Image: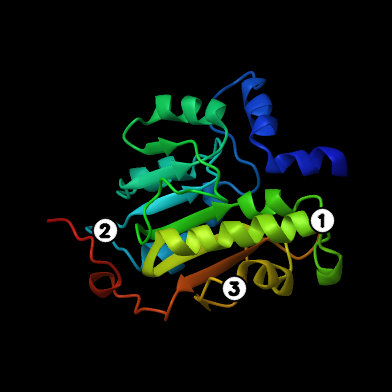
Amino acid sequence: MADSEAAQMRNADYWDSRYSNEDDPATKEWHLGPEKLEGYLEENIYSRWPKGTVPKIVQLGSGASSVPFEMFARGYTDQTCIEFSEAVIAQMALQNPTIKWLPHDLRNMPEIESNSFDFAFDKATFYAMCAYGPTHLLKSIPQVIVKDTAAYSREVFRILKPGGVFVCINIFEPRYVHHLLKVEGTEWTDLHAPLALTPAGWAYTRAYGLVKGPVEPTDGAEATSNSKE
């Protein structure tokens, strides 16, 4: 992909055109699919909210991914998918209208209340914001990327509850990710060190887990106040 095309990935029009031109509107994975994320999610997320609890989950830039549907099938039914492509939102809403599908720009979501969600999940959205920049050279990051990712991080921090977890799946080096996400206006604590999800090499993918405030115990009864009543 040329840098000029990659730069367009920060705009809704690019994704509207891309999804509208798809011959098959069924779910598609951009980057890792749910089967490759299962082990990580089981150990680091599902264990925090075991069966019988209903955390409020926000999928950030959900696109046409099947991850929301896989989580829904496991009993995580309180999900909100936010995506600024109205074309894909319309497609996905037809497949599961129980999930909330909202067309918002993740860099500015005034319609979303603060302290609303227990868990925020990003699979390649941050990656798309950074796709036309370097993967590790901090001094060479285009200012538009710095601005976009800072606004994104602040909004995710704002809409999470205290103790809420933000998982960001991407290919970038830890110092690059932390430089762009741990910005003024946020107070992220590491849930864990960056965890490898694929073998080292091109598109080496890691999971970054961040917590809003201090890290909470992983016991499900203590980790969430949203138990079924």
Q: Is residue 81 above or below residue 161?
A: above
Residue at point 85%, 70% (across, down): 139
Q: Disc 1 designates what residue? A: 133
Q: Disc 3 designates what residue? A: 184
Q: From where the camera sits, is residue 42 visible?
A: no
Please identify the residue farthest to the left as the structure is shown. Answer: 229
* Mark 3, other Cα within 10 Å: few <14 / some 14–19 / many ≥20: few
Q: In terms of sequence position, does the residue under pointer 3 or pointer 2 come before the other? A: 2
State the image coordinates of residue 106 (x, y, percent, origin top left). Answer: 54, 48
Please identify the residue farthest to the front as the structure is shown. Answer: 110
* Mark 2, other Cα within 10 Å: few <14 / some 14–19 / many ≥20: few
Left/right placement of residue 226 relative to residue 150 reads left
Residue 2 location, quadrant:
top right
Q: Mark 3 and mark 2 in contact? Answer it, CB < 8 Å.
A: no
Left/right placement of residue 15 relative to residue 109 reads right
Cα gap from disc 1 to disc 2, whole angstroms: 40 Å
Q: Which mark is residue 220?
A: none
Kind of element beneath mark 3: loop
Q: Amino acid at mark 2?
A: Lys
- 10 or 32: nearer the viewer: 10
Q: Is residue 35 above or below residue 114?
A: above
